[in-house]
Every structure is written in C-alpha cells, then in structure tokens.
Image: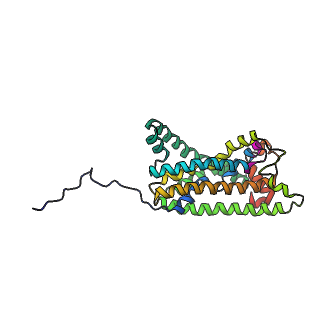
Amino acid sequence: MSTVPAKPTATSRTPSQLKRVLSLWDLIIIGIVIVQPIAPIGIFGVVSNEARGHVVTTILIAMVAMLFTAISYGKMARVYPSASSAYTYVGREIHPALGFVTGWAMVMDYVLNPLICTVICSKLTQNIFPNVPYWGLAISFTAMFTMLNLGAVKTSAQINNVLAAGMMIVVVIFLGFAAHFIWGLHQLGGSAFAQPFYNPQTFQWQGIFRGTSIAVLTYIGFDGISTLSEEAENPKRNILRATIAVCVITGLLSGIEVYAAQLVWGAKPFPPEMVESAFPIVAWQAGGFFTC
C-alpha cells in the first residue's frame, strides 16, 4: 500500500539562511576597512602628548592586549557561529539579561561609529577645502555612506576592497614622503630611530599606561567580523583567523605609521589647538600639501 507524502507545514519548512559568500580574504578586508588602515590618525596627537612621544610603544602594548580579546571572539564564534555576535555569547554563556544589555551596547557602537567617521571625514576634508562648510561635508558623507551600505553583502565586500586599496595608497604616499624627510635630517644619530619606542629622557610608565588606554581605540571595530558568521564560508575556522589577522595587521600597520610620524615630529608635545589635527600637521611637515 503506497502512502501519500504529507504536505509540508509551516513548522516543517527549512528556515531561511543567509548566503555564505564571504571568504577568509573577504573577512580580513572587511575587518581592515571597519578598523581602517588610518585608524591612529585621529588619536595620534592625544596619545603622543600623554605618552610623551611613545605612540609606537602604546600601539604595540594595546595590540597584545587586544589579541586576547580577538582570540576570545574567535573561540566564541566557533561555538556560536551567529550573526548576533557578543549578544549571543554573553546571553548564552552568562545570562540572557546581560546579553540584552550587551546587544544594546552593540547597537550604540554601530550608531556612534558612522557618526564618528562622518565627523572625522568632514573635519579632515576641511583641511584641504577650508571654504566648504562643515554641514555640507557632513551631509555629503552621510549620503555617501548610506548609499554604500544599501548594497548586498557581496557588493559591500567589493567596495571594501576598493576602500582598503585607497587607504593603503594614502598610507604608502605618507610613508614615502616621511622617509624622504627623515633621510634629509643628517643630524639624526642612530639612537634617534629608537626613540619612538624608548626615549630615556621622556619615558614614564604612568604616561605609557595613559596613552595605551587611548591607543586601544585604534582597534575598535575588529569584533564586527563576528557579526558576519552567518555569511562567511566555514565560520568556525575563518572568523577566528580573520579576527586575529585583522588585529595583528592593524597593530603592525598603525605602528609603522606612527613610528614614521614620530620621527618626523619628534617627542615635543603638540599645542592644545593642534592636538586634533596632529597627524595632518605632521604629514604637511613631511610632504607639504600633497600628503595633508
């Protein structure tokens, strides 16, 4: 006697899933763009003043500390490959109420981060076009960021590749002019190249710790990789690898940037009115208008 297959019900349907289209390389590029290769530019002046010219040291110490967080995120992504990231980790492992609070904290992060990017981009653009009003630049950047985020995740990944390449070109140009500037300073001795790491005349642990507490902002955003767990290929492996890779790449690249900037500027403090635009000022000193 044959049987007629039962009609599928609402409860028997396979739940819809996101497409797993992001490779390990896509995750790394997205993470680098979220953190930004030019991440230390905004805080360079503040950290330099607090750490008394030891920005490289604070960046590297912060990288070691953030690596433990990166490994933790990767390990949790293996257990809970969910797009909700820390919300799921805290809610499932500790308590749902704490997960709820963590989720709202994540929402605040993703609300504030675009606002910070808009402010920084508008302010830095005014260094090049001082006659353009700030409100006009802010509206333009907001509209551009909104349009870029309206595409699908694969489109966003492709745009991120372009953005990462563009920012890397800017970094390479700055490093080139910084190297040319430093090469022209014949009075520099060999010890001067170690001073951004350790200058016995200005080194203080108290200042290093204060600077490090600010330098960790360089790494803000790498945790966003874990929110792509449901769109990543082999998330149990790739999320961990991508998170650690982004943290290390960010630390090393940021360290090179601030090392060059510190050699150009030296250990002298930035005046209060120059702190926010410290890195563009150093770029101007190294290469003039072309690098600012």
Is the C terminus in the top left, top right, bottom left or bottom right quadrant?
A: bottom right
How is the rendered protein coloured?
rainbow
Main SS, magenta residues:
helix
When the figure is inspected, residue 12 is found, relative to residue 207, above or below; the finding is below
Q: Is residue 275 left or right of residue 29?
A: right
Question: Residue extending furthest right?
Answer: 187
Read off the magenta span. 48-56
Q: Residue at x 41, y 56 (%)?
A: 18
52 magenta-colored: yes
Q: Quarter of the image for the N terminus: give it.
A: bottom left
Whole-percent x and y of residue 169?
67, 63
Relative horizontal placement of residue 62, taking residue 111 as reference (left or right): right
Q: Position of residue 15 (x, y in %)?
A: 34, 53
**105 or 247: nearer the eye?**
247
Magenta stretch holds residue 14: no
Towards the viewer: 174 or 83: 83
Residue 60 visible in the snapshot: yes
